[in-house]
Structures are given as C-alpha cells and as structure tokens.
Amino acid sequence: MRSESVVMSIDGSTKQTISLPQVFQTPFRPEVIHRVYVNLLSHMYQRQGRYPSAGEIVSAESRNTGLGIARLARIRGQGFSRSGQAAGVAGVRAGRVAHPPESWKVIRKKINKKERRLGLSSAIAATARKDLIIRRGHSTEGIPNFPIISSDDIESITKTRDLQKTLVAFGLANDLSRARRPKKNVKATANKGSGTTHAAKSALIVVKEGSKIVRLSNSIPGVDVKTVDSLSVLDLAPGSKPIRLTIFSRGSLDYLERSSVTGKDNRDSEGK
C-alpha cells in the first residue's frame, strides 16, 4: 500500500505531499469486506409478518367423499361467482400462504466488532488501489494519484455548480458522464417498474463532521457525501464490490490519524 499521496486544491492544482494514515497499510481482504457488507445490510431489513387467519376467513366446508372430487373445503352458496371453488387452504385462489414470513424471525445478522473494524479498515485502504477502482467500473482517465485527497476548502462548498467544477478539476469528468448515462433494468418486476432507470455510482466524498458540503449529497447523479465519523463499508463498497472511487478531505484524514478505525476507542459508526 502507498504511504504518501498528493493533496490537491479545489482548482485541481497540487498543493503538497503528505503521509497517509496508518489505516491505509491494512491488507486488502475482500472476503471480510463482503461479510461485513452483508451483515450491515441486514440491519436495514424490515421485519415482515402475516395475519395468522389471512386467507382462512371464508364460509367453506368439505363435501366429503363420493362425489369424484377432491375433499377440499369449498365455497358454499348458490349464484356466487366463487361457489364451489376450493378455499381456506394453501395452493388455491385467494387461499392462505403455505409458509408465510413470521415477524419473530431473526433477520439481523451479527458480526464481531474486530471483524467489522477490519472490514472498514481494509475498504479504506483499498481506495488507494487504482486497479480495484478500475475493476469496479470507474473511469479513471485524468486522475494522477490515488487516493484522491482534497484540501479542506472542499468542505465549504455550498453550490452544486461549484462542486461540479471541483470534481472536473480533479479529473472525474469521464466518471461523472458514465454515472449520468441511464441504466435500464434487465427485467421488470413488481418492485422494479418497466422502463425505470437508475444512476450508477460515481465518487464518494468523505469530509469532517459539520461540513457544509454534506447538504450537496446526491445533488450530482452518483455522487455521495459522507462524514468520516459515519463512514461505512456500505458506502465504500456498494454491492460488496470493492472499491468505490473516493475523495478524502485533508481534515477527514486527520480524523483517521487521530482515532484509527482499528482502535478500541474509535466510535463504531459503521454499525449504524
């Protein structure tokens, strides 16, 4: 892993060379990143349940044997559209679900604290590897150094057009264009409507807590802004595929240097 990198001003000019925090020396562990991602993602799942009597509240009874038909409970009555239809059991029209989800089922996966910290540290260190960034699909033409480190002036940006100019100055023009290209669903389902489009992931900007630029998160398609104290593997490796093109402010690196994500005293914000 690299031990030094270049700090750039918001106009794209080189400002100085600094030493990277110790966390950037963490070995690349894709299996740990994947496990941490899957476990943290499970914390967002919503519990599901079904009304116990759903599909069974119906006036139906079995006609027993001797009629040459199955002994299923059938709708009673004359002149109704469903008279004689099977009901109240699984596998029939408007019947109950065979094995419905239960609200008491444990769907939140646990993960060891040290493993979670290792996954986050490894993901942060991977942002310095150009080969992993290209493998994910980012366009890196015109970007000379990784990780991309900006001066603290980026934290004071309050307008989208200024942020756009800064990202272009950093060499991200091609990647921003890639993220703007609509990506259609391969298959339309009930949850994914036909013809809907989704923006690809572009740069992730990591800044100090209280920075004004946080309000511009998602103002540019594919560009997210996160504070360093709430940084998570979910942000650095969307879909558990390392690693996302990331821009660190100088202040966020100072935070990582002071309170290493592998230390016991660091806040485990990635578990939020």
Image (cartoon, rainbow, N blue to C red):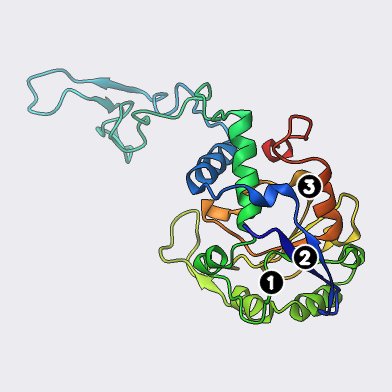
Q: Earlier in the sequence, mark 1 or mark 3?
A: 1
Residue 8 rendering spot, x and y as whole percentages: 82, 72
Q: Which residue is mark 3?
A: 256
Looking at the rendered image, the quarter that the N terminus falls into is bottom right
Residue 67 rendering spot, x and y as whole percentages: 9, 25
Q: Is residue 169 above or below residue 117?
A: below
Q: Residues within 10 Å of mark 3 (few under 14, many from 20)?
A: many
Residue in front for this viewpoint, 174 or 121: 121
Amino acid type of the residue that numbered disc 2 sits on in the rendered structure: Ile
Q: Is residue 17 above or below residue 24?
A: below
Label 1 and label 3: CA atoms lie apart by 19 Å
Apparent side of residue 212 relative to residue 8 in the rendered image (left or right): right
Residue 202 rendering spot, x and y as whole percentages: 64, 68
**Do tag 2 and tag 1 residues touch (Cβ < 8 Å)?**
yes
Q: Earlier in the sequence, mark 2 or mark 3?
A: 2
Q: Which residue is mark 2?
A: 149
Q: Residue at x 58, y 34 (%)?
A: 115
**Visible residue check, residue 217:** no
Residue in front for this viewpoint, 41 or 252: 252
**Visible residue check, residue 251:** yes
Q: Residue at x 50, y 66 (%)?
A: 135
Apparent side of residue 131 relative to residue 266 in the rendered image (left or right): left
Label 2 and label 1: CA atoms lie apart by 9 Å
Residue 47 rendering spot, x and y as whole percentages: 56, 31
Q: Is residue 60 above or below residue 149?
A: above
State the image quarter where residue 222 is shown. bottom right
Amino acid type of the residue that numbered disc 3 sits on in the rendered structure: Leu
Secondary structure of the residue carrying tag 3 is helix
Q: Residues within 10 Å of mark 1 (few under 14, many from 20)?
A: some
Q: Which residue is mark 1?
A: 145
Label 2 and label 3: CA atoms lie apart by 13 Å
